[in-house]
Amino acid sequence: MFHIKAILSPGTKEAAALVALIVAIISFSIIRFEAAPHVPILISILLLMCYGLVKKLSYRELERGLIEGASAGMGAVFLFFFIGILISSWMMSGTIPTLIYAGFSLVTPVFFFAVVFVVTAIIGLSIGSSLTTVATVGVPLIGIAGALDLSLAITAGAIVSGAFFGDKMSPLSDTTNLAASIVGVDLFEHIRNMGWTTIPAFILTLVFFGLLSPSVSLDHTENIALFKEGLLETGLIHWYAMAPLVVLIGLTVFKVPAVLTLAASSVVALSVSLFHQSLQMPSMLGILFGGYQSATGIEEVDALLSRGGMESMFFTIALVLLALSMGGLLFKLGIIQSLLAKIESLLKKVSSVIVASALTAIGTNILVGEQYLSILLAGQAFQEPYKKVGLAGKNLSRVMEDAGTVVNPLVPWSVCGIFIASVLDVSTLEYLPFAFFCLLSPLLTVLLGVSGKTLTYIEENSVK
């Protein structure tokens, strides 16, 4: 965003007042009225345009700021379309259903909370959506915990931890793709770099849940059996359905660009689907656009499998374009530059830049309650400070995920917090102390940033 030349130099107080007003509009709309963020962002854009017009700026200049801001997200938009196609093709081939079936097969009475964490992590990785994982898989798991008289708060914490691990590390996740695209980092390079904080957080979380798990007998398995039966009835569970995943992993290892990797895996998935489905080309093209629709007759299974397609990405794409357009205006009007100039003297060390960007992502989640905006704002505002201290962009994209994506479910008035609490019937404050993965991720990213470990520098292009 710093390539956008500012045409105003507002005072710090004026810039802060405008940002505070925008935050108030967006957060009040989302928290009080439970509105989608699109409309309040559009209202904020109109507010900024009115501010610019009052300052005697031409409409053309303001429009140019919108366009320059939105253009920064075109790479992400293109990638999102391929993600939608990949999900629907993996549904047709049976890749995702087979992975989910394998996850359910892991549920045992031994180390129950740890198993819940692992199962939701596998399914979250498979479908790339934390909220879908919570709403489908999380419900029967919380039901089993209730039947066994186990802690619902700890179970919910394990579900949330696993779901957001999957959301964070899955190449199918929109937040993962967004974080990589905003700072111009290859998707799989971004995922590999997140391993420095994510793997330790995963291991520690697994240990914590293992220690908390009681010794019980798992007698109430009706819900799990229902899911597995429904998955088998789809006719999609096959060993060869793993071929698209193998291709994805193989091309990732060889560092093939994300778009080409996703396209190749989708082609393999479509080829695999021909072995067990008699789909005609019009139907196949329709599924690639509109998504896969499961018809097992089991509501929970159908909700889990009915997803994907280019159309499913429109919500995220619209939000990205609107938020980036607003960011373009904020930079065009010199508002972000004015605020950053105030703290520029504090952003001369690597540790201070990382801490500031992490606090920005966390603060946006707390103030606005929207994870996309936390990623977008931190990514837009801190690209230049990271460059000034010699840090490569993938350090910023990692912080955006560690302190942005996984923090949202910990905020009671956030989009994820409200949704999860209503679906699992466990309040956010109850499961928050046990959402270990979500608590550890921002802590580890700050600690490693302050220590200087695992950071990649532009000049050296090596991990320290």
Image (cartoon, helix red, strand yellow):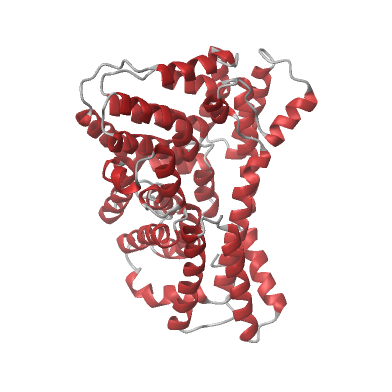
Q: Residue visible at 37% across and 28% down?
A: 143
Query: Does residue 252 appear left or right of residue 74 in this picture?
Result: left
Which one is in front, 136 or 124?
136
Number of dots carrying numbers:
0
Q: Residue visible at 34% across and 47% down?
A: 428
> For residue 348, what is the image quadrant?
bottom left
- Above or below residue 362? Residue 348 is below
Residue 44 placed where, x, y %?
A: 57, 69
> For residue 199, what is the image quadrant?
top left
- Above or below residue 20? Residue 282 is above
Q: State whether residue 235 appears in this view.
A: yes
Query: Does residue 395 appear left or right of residue 57 in this picture?
Result: left
Residue 329 placed where, x, y %?
A: 59, 71
Q: Quadrant of the N terminus?
A: bottom right
- Above or below residue 96? Residue 368 is below
Q: Residue visible at 51% across and 68% down?
A: 25
Q: State whether residue 454 appears in this view.
A: no
Residue 6 placed where, x, y %?
A: 57, 76
Which one is in front, 88 or 419?
419
Residue 134 placed where, x, y %?
A: 44, 36
Query: Does residue 84 appear left or right of residue 239 in this picture?
Result: right
